[in-house]
Image: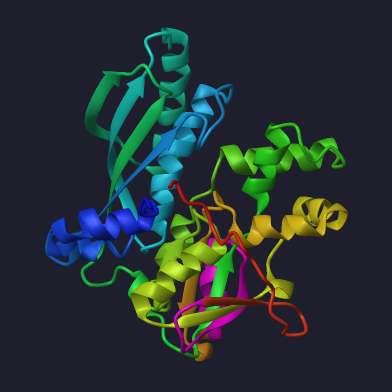
Amino acid sequence: MAAPKLGEFERIARFFAPLAAPEGLNLLDDVAIIPGPPGEDYVLKTDAIVEGVHFLPDDPADQVAQKLLRVNLSDLAGKGASPVGYLLTTALPKERDEAWLKRFAHGLAQDQAEYGIGLLGGDSVATTGPVTLSVAAVGRVAAGKAVLRSGARPGDIVYVSGTLGDAALGLRVLRGGLGGLDTAERDFLADRYRLPRPRLRLGRQLVGTARAMMDVSDGLIADLGHICEASGVGAVVETARLPLSPAARSAIATDASLIKAALAEGDDYEILFTTPAEAAAAVTAAASAASVPVTAIGRIERGTDVRVVDQAGAPVVVTDRGYRHF
């Protein structure tokens, strides 16, 4: 009998974690941290997006470029870092013409101006496969102040920024689903899928308050599970507390099973963090300073897993707990 195939994170643990330098944090976080100028650390992050997996073939090229940048900036936000610049690698089929490249570059230029960053270099290659794009982002944070996944403690409150599930529902819209929503709701959800909003200012405001922090990219339960694994704790999430946009509420009202979009599907790119219970006032102040809402959705507890409960405290079974590539 053939051995079961390794999942995404099992592959990383078996083949790549043994290769990690100390600055790579044993590959248990989503960034690396290296010393920078006196009083600063550099935060390094790389993410790739692939046509047909992370964006649709007919998505506008400028928005593809912006999504590529923003998913990386979101990881910097999840450490409390400020972006410095990025390196870009493109693997493009030869039929991608100059018009596509011009629009792609325009999207990069727009976000460079928005986030105060510049292109530092990279590579460009041809491929016979789908468009594959990768960014290596560089950020900086005060020395020793990056907020890692590993600081959560039992009794901490679990918070998330913004709203959950919009991007996953937006992908359904772009694939022709959720026909019961009105045009404004459909447009809102599609936009949330195509254009993440990296919470850089909120991340910086939470330095010194958050004990553990990361962005939500693979789904709430999966990413909270990463915090729990790195911190050696468990967690409980209350479905009644999940922050949902009006458009997501409309979708879930017609099909209750769509709550899984908020619990276990990816592309939210919101900030997930834990703080001591007594830090509630500091969290409120950080959210106000960043003009981003935050919601307490659960707590950290002793254990090793993420539990989901309903309003009455009864267990909610979630079979698919997050996106995985393998």
103 to 149, vertically: above or below: above
Q: Nearer the viewer, residue 72 or 55?
A: 55
Q: Nearer the viewer, residue 247 or 5?
A: 5
Judge whether 202 appears above or below 266 on screen: below
Name which quarter of the figure residue 130 lies in.
top left
Where is residue 176? Give x, y as percent: 75, 31
Q: Position of residue 120 (x, y in %)?
A: 23, 34
Residue 124 appearing in the image: yes
> What segment is highlighted magenta in the picture?
280-305
Residue at image location 50% in from the left, 23% down from the top: 61
Above or below, comparing residue 16 to residue 147 in the picture: above
- x, y percent for residue 185: 79, 43
What residue is at 49 percent from the left and 77 percent from the top?
305
Q: Is residue 300 left or right of residue 264?
A: left
The colour mode here is rainbow
Residue 287: image quadrant is bottom right
Q: Is residue 42 visible?
A: no
- Looking at the picture, does residue 12 appear above or below residue 296? above
Q: Is residue 216 left or right of residue 150?
A: right
Residue 243 placement: quadrant: bottom right
Tell whether position 290 is magenta: yes
- Residue at the spot x=48%, y=81% of the render? 234
Q: Is residue 306 covered in magenta? A: no
Asked whether 18 or 274 is in front, the reply is 18
Count every numbered label the image shows and give the total: 0
Q: Residue furthest front?
A: 1
* Residue 202 image point, x, y percent: 48, 63
Tell me if 276 is positioned left or right of 143 in this view.
Answer: right
